[in-house]
Image: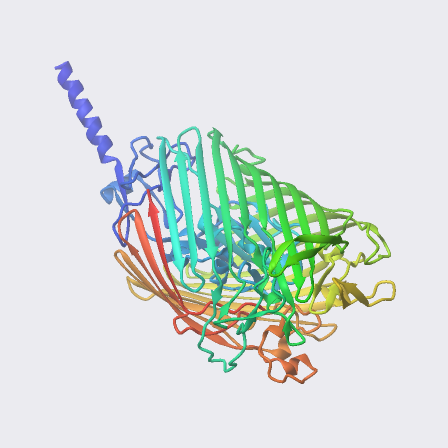
Amino acid sequence: MHKLLLLFLSLFCTLFARGQKLHILEKESKFPIERVFVHDDTNTYLSFTDKNGIVDLSKFPQDAVIHFQHIAYIDRQFTKGELAKIHYKLYLENASEQIQEVVLSVSKSKENRKRVAEQIEVVTQYEIQEISPQTSADLLAQTPGVKVQKSQFGGGSPILRGMEANRVLLVVDGVRLNNAIYRKGHLQNAITVSPNLLSRMEVLFGPSSILYGSDALGGVIHYYTKKPHISETPCFNSTAFSRYSNSNNEISMSYTGEYSSKKWASLTGISFSKFGDLKMGKNRVHGFTDWGLVPYYSTNSDTYYQTEAQPNSDPNIQRNTGFSQIDLLQKILIPLSKKTQLNFNFQYSTSSDIPRFDKLNEYKDDNLHYAEWYYGPQKRFLASSQLQLNPDKKWMKTGQLIISYQDIYETRQERKFTSLNTYFRNENVKVWSATGDFHVPLLTNDKRILSYGFETSYNKVQSKAIGKVLAVDGHSITGYTNTFDIPSRFPDGGSSYTNFALYTDYRLDHNTRGTLNIGLRFTNTFLKAKWIDTSFITLPEMEISLSNAAFSGTIGYIYKPNKKWKLSSVLSSGFRSPNIDDIGKIREKRGKVSVPNTHLKPEYAYNAEIGALYHISKKSWVGFNSYYTLLTQYINRDLYSINGQNMLLYDGEWATSIANVNKGNAYIVGATLSLQTKLSEHLKFKSSTSFTKGATYDTKEPLSSIPPLFGNAKLSYQLNKWNFALDYHFNAHKKSSNYNISEGIDNIEETPIIDPIASDMTEKYYGTPAWQTFSFSSQLKLTRHINTSLFIDNIFDIHYKEFASGVSAPGRNIAMTLHARF
């Protein structure tokens, strides 16, 4: 009898355990979903689904609320009783099916979107895979409200609310990428994080977040790279990705391997991309038959010398646009206790030489001006350690500490036709930083949350330059015969930039309908620079030490009159202290040379915005956001004299001197209208349209970096294993009268010429022509481990240029991708 009882109990326990094995499937394809993170409210019990989409829930308490999370799917939570009612079979929907309910960048922790007043766009890993961009700049260009300028194909300068470059803050895994030499104008560094290694991207618009401080006048772009996860049982998972595109013969490959165990986890990622010369569209609906064509190009290289530009056999191919890039990612996760985790993050990105296409395509006296102009290998190294804390104390419920080090290396090499003089400029920036972000609920129900933190960083800049005279033998370059002194781009005696900031943020749900958010930040910056060489320029002060400090703040309010409506308003201020590039840069562009201005002051932004979000249904919504930004003491490029001289000899040519100077007041107004709706069980539509206008109050000029009206729409159909989509993108005409001519940032010279003899630039050039493109994509899940995609971009092979860009956009492009999980 005793043995029979034991046998019965053993059989009962076995059947009970089997009854608590949950099967998780994708709703459309019915394929199992691997690596779904399963945990309770306190993270005491953790697990993952296996390759068959199965997870054992027997260890979870009977009354526990169990959460199911996967980066590509909508989060769900159930009790065991609720799971029993659905027979332990759970179907998850793709994350793109509804507006993202959780955002990370606003408070640097998980925050319900219903409590966020700021305009924000979230791009999930599923959407990144669905878009399959060639670079992160192309990913940004697909994001509503974001415009991207390109001086060359190997780059991309995102524009948020009429601001770009060092007015937009780039962040990766909580570490700011902006450094002391991020410049005004166009900044191409957005591509130094591979989209193939991203798990998520968030774009926060406007200066409303006090967590980020200086540089975030236009907004914040936060890249989140893939990360490892802890598992109760040891396991190894890997993914591989490859893509081919015919518009530039792109070949991209990436691999990610993740090892998980109870005591530690590791993720290793590598991404490689090689791009050939880019082919533009042939269909010139804008009516300008020669605009953008490349009839001649330079064949010069490190080893080959040619005195004249050579004819291009196909002027639609933009010679000297190809490059390659390698990105490496290594992360290690160590749980020190149930409430503390330590993360190590190592990133390295390097490229081949990147041709500066707009300079190589620049003419002077009807001839190409430059034989060589390229960025040498652009190298970025990042090492950071992140300590995640969950002490659940009165003074801190959760928090994180990040200590990081970055080493950035940039080079520029240029040489003009008919000259043997080659100019080399090298920049090295080392950045040490530390940030701390902490959160504490003031009530047990989290209706009142106080956040506080700090940020500090130190930038050390070394700038070197040298001129070398080529030694040639026919068409062969055999070396250099001599060297000569040239001015460095930044202070040759070294420079540094230090930032320190404190912030506090308070979020209150004062009732079920209203949420109030108040934040305050204090920032103090210190800049030191020293110039030694006086052969090119003598400044009034050859050594400077500057300090700037400011408070910035935000007040946001959300009102939800019912479950369908969300109304929001934000008042905020921003502050950008001049960095080394703003104050101390020397460089030439189209006959104008930028010189240092050691008296430059900070610029300030005061922002007001309102937003409305109406939920038509759970998966359909329409949103509207409008804003007004006042810029005071705004920084602008203008004519500038040093020691009474306004002409300087730079790289063998006389040029007019200009500098960044403080002006009076300016404004930017704009609005974004977005729509997403599910037309049927399988058919979905979404669209976005953005309008921006900006001008100065003091000089009555248009502001630089203001894009024309632009937007996109997407109609997608999903059935079982198939997904089809038709994309539409448009850009309105930007008239030449709406260009800022004095700064030269808008590159009106890159637009069609309508009157060659006109002296007025607005009469000589047409401005950016309007354009529209259609694209088609199809994804097929061959098996639960293998996905394949086909893309036909710019179906009608339309020729166009993005606003202010030097390079024409790709013509018709056919791309194929393969994504596999092992």
Seen at 36% across and 50% down, the residue is 73
Q: Classify residue 264 by image quadrant.
A: top left
For this view, does 458 lie left or right of residue 778? Answer: right
| Residue 672 image offset from top left, x and y in percent | 51, 67
Give the residue at the far front of this rendering.
473
Is residue 822 at least partly visible in the picture?
Answer: yes
Give the residue at the far top of this rendering.
2
Query: In the picture, which quadrant includes the C terminus?
Result: top left
Is residue 618 at least partly visible in the picture?
Answer: no
| Residue 746 image offset from top left, x and y in percent | 63, 70
Of residues 670 and 656, the one drawn nearer to the viewer in this rendering: 656
Above or below, 573 against 591 in this view is: above
Q: Classify residue 161 by image quadrant.
A: bottom right
Query: In the picture, which quadrant includes the N terminus?
Result: top left
Q: Classify residue 666 by image quadrant.
A: bottom right
The colour mode here is rainbow
| Residue 162 image offset from top left, x and y in percent | 60, 66
Of residues 108 and 653, the one drawn nearer to the viewer in this rendering: 653
Seen at 34% across and 53% down, the residue is 818
For this view, does 422 lie left or right of residue 436? Answer: right
Of residues 91 and 448, the one drawn nearer to the viewer in this rendering: 91
Q: How many marks?
A: 0
Above or below, 599 against 92 in this view is: below
